[in-house]
Image (spheres, rainbow, N blue to C red):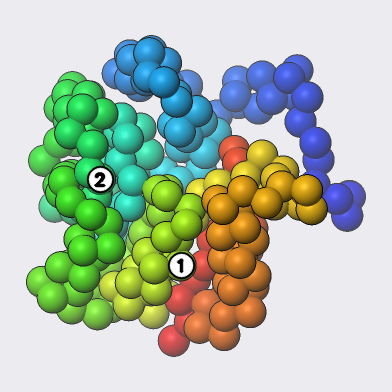
Amino acid sequence: MTEQTLQLDSTLHDYLLSIVPAETQVEQRLCARTAQYEAPQMRIGLEQARFMRVLARAMGVRRALEVGTFTGYSALAVAQALPPDGRLITLDKDPHSTADARRFWQEAGVADRIELRLEDAADGLRALLEEYGTGTFDFAFLDADKENYTVYYELALELIRPGGLIAVDNVLWSGAVADPNDDRPSTQALRRFNQRLAEDPRVDVSVVPIGDGVTLAAKLP
């Protein structure tokens, strides 16, 4: 038993990856393609993908949304857990990276469960509220520009049903949020966002130190 989160060195991290379900060939090709991008670190890691897949499956998610698609690895993870008639709507503005995402979703056999909307995320979330109404989604994953996290969170919270879950990526920001000398706008925005969620009475919050830090916010009744 320990009161502090275990720090993973490379040996222990490799072991962790060896005891979760291995990447499929499609996922391996997706990762190889993503490695050719200027910022491949925007893709979540295997351990986080498996974590999100298990979450979605355990919750019985039927309708999910995502803000920030990139090359589609996180969307693929969630879509794998959806029933055949389930739906994930993902929002992004980049037609280049999302074209790769579409190809890999098709290869993985889950393209019919994923709807990509190429538009501004805030506008897209507002459109979903008009189209579907409040409390109509089970799960949301936020992984886009950090300065607008609060905007995305507030809109997602309206869309999520009571008992539903919002997962927010990069909340530890490679440790920068705890560095008083880091005053980048993205870092400051994340600090404000993290504090806001810690004090939000509408949700029950846990921060999981997986990947770059994932906040889980369960919407209370």
Between 141 and 99, which is closer to the camera in this rendering? Answer: 99
Between 48 and 109, which is closer to the camera in this rendering? Answer: 48
Residue 105 figure quarter:
top left
Q: Is residue 171 visible?
A: no
Say what secondary structure mark 2 lies in.
Answer: strand
Q: Amino acid at mark 1?
A: Thr
User: Residue 192's spot in the image, x, y percent?
Assistant: 61, 67
Q: Horizontal placement of 44 versus 32: left or right? A: right
- Residue at (44%, 86%) from the top-left corner? 221
The residue under label 1 is 150
Q: Which mark is residue 8?
A: none
Counting residues from the start of the chain, the first of labels 1 and 2 encountered is 2
- Residue at (56%, 59%) from the top-left corner? 189
Say what secondary structure mark 1 lies in.
Answer: helix
The residue under label 2 is 92
- Residue at (46%, 67%) from the top-left corner? 150
How many residues crowd mark 1 within 10 Å: few (<14), some (14–19), many (20+)?
some
Q: Horizontal placement of 11 versus 114: left or right? A: right
Question: What is the number of callouts on the image?
Answer: 2
Q: CA distance from mark 1 to mark 2?
A: 17 Å
User: Residue 50's spot in the image, x, y percent?
Assistant: 47, 37
Q: Amino acid at mark 2?
A: Asp
- Residue at (42%, 16%) from the top-left corner? 35
